[in-house]
Amino acid sequence: MKKTVYLFLSILLLSLYGCIRSEDNIVEVTNPTPISTKKGTVSGKVMAKNGIKPIGGALVFTFDSQNKLYHTYSNSAGDFTLEAPEGPRKIHIQTGDGSNFRSEFTITVPKTDNVVASANLTKLNQVANMAYVKGSYDEIEDIVTGLGYLVTEIDYNDLKVMSTLSQYDVIFLNCGSRGQSHSGTSTPNNDTEVYDNLATFVSNGGSLYASDWDVAYLLGGNNNTPACNTSGGFIPDALMCSTSTGSATTYTNCAVSNVNLANALGFNTLDIQYDLGSWQKIISYDVAFWEVLVQRNNEALMVRTNKFHSTGAPAMPVGNSANSGWVTICHDDNGTPVTITVNQSDLQAHLTHGDSVGSCTGVSTSGNIYYTTFHNHATGNIGNTAPILQYVILNL
């Protein structure tokens, strides 16, 4: 009998152990758990400076007080929805690594609700100084200005003056620019000043875009590059061979082989019209050096790299003074690397978090080189290559 009474009392005490009385309320005692951060969302549409063209593939991000990154990307229509901790948050919008085009604004994120950022906040601002060399068959400057951005014309002889080049972050080399007047220089493949300056420019963070015949700036040649291992250029011959052997034709079902580019564009196949004979075909390339962005079967049509660096290039500041005080870093997002550009004042917090200075890929001090076998024409016959070139402009 005593054992039965003892068992009954034990069960009764155990049933009461999980509760305590606090004034007139019964409070269940549980193991304490950390309070999770309340989150809301910010939505909007990333637009070019002209307020008309939506920008796909833009990185939109913010941080919490522990330097945790919250990020997303705009879709091909420019739309984004970013999850973020509640309260006042600085929202960053960047394309490329953020050193040439970026915007930021502060907005209050509501708890478990959405706030829409107004269109004037989400326009992508130009930070870079950009220049172009006029060409015979290409006018990419029209695309730049059509987006609402600024670009300055320079000429072939300006490429020989490093103090001129160092003013710019981005230089566009239009197809046929080497066929312009060179002030008595009839053999550009011997212009070592140009090649040395371009090598120094890229090694110190400047970015280049060249199209079609202007691969000669990279690999050598006069108006174009007629054969492999042509004299001149600043990229070693082993890294690419291009010859001016393309014939007038239309390439159908070309593949956008880079996933980020395809997502930004909203399509992954396109037709490309080559309406001029003797365009530059990429015969071979080093897959460890070049990334293929657009191709037809196994033929590369658009490539890029940020892995060029000349060990003999002098170190010097390149680009817009507005970039001073900002630094490009590789942010560690729970094991996933994300390249962003942040204010110098925030750098130490990022380094403490485990981030590192420089892009997540390539050489930390080097800029990008984009090369396309196609280009835009003065006649406007560019089709779906137009949004590709817009992407190039914003991601150099």
Image (spheres, rainbow, N blue to C red):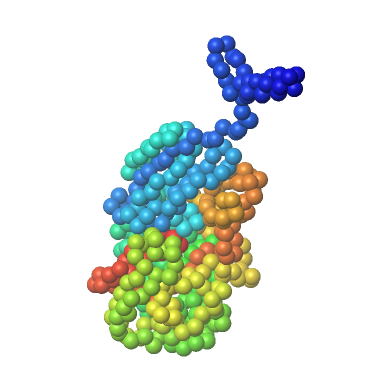
Q: Residue at 44% x, 81% y: name it.
A: 298
Residue furthest out toward the top: 23
Name the spot of residue 158 as percent of width and height, x first: 45, 68
Residue 192 placement: quadrant? bottom right
Q: Is residue 285 above or below residue 48?
A: below
Name the spot of residue 28 as percent of width and height, x first: 58, 23
> How many badges with numbers are in the image?
0
Residue furthest out toward the front: 1
Q: Residue at 31% x, 63% y: name it.
A: 142
- Which of 339/266 is in front? 266
Q: Residue at 49% x, 83% y: name it.
A: 284
Residue 365 placement: quadrant? bottom right
- Which of 6/388 is in front? 6
Q: Is residue 172 above or below residue 65?
A: below
Q: Residue at 54% x, 15% y: name it.
A: 25
Name the spot of residue 138 as percent of width and height, x first: 33, 72
Q: Position of 78 compared to 15: left or right?
A: left
Q: Position of 295 compared to 206: left or right?
A: left
Q: Is residue 64 visible?
A: yes
Q: Is residue 315 above or below residue 82?
A: below
Name the spot of residue 52 as percent of width and height, x first: 28, 52
User: What is the quadrant of the C terminus in the image?
Assistant: bottom left
- Which of 379/106 is in front? 106
Q: Is residue 189 visible?
A: no
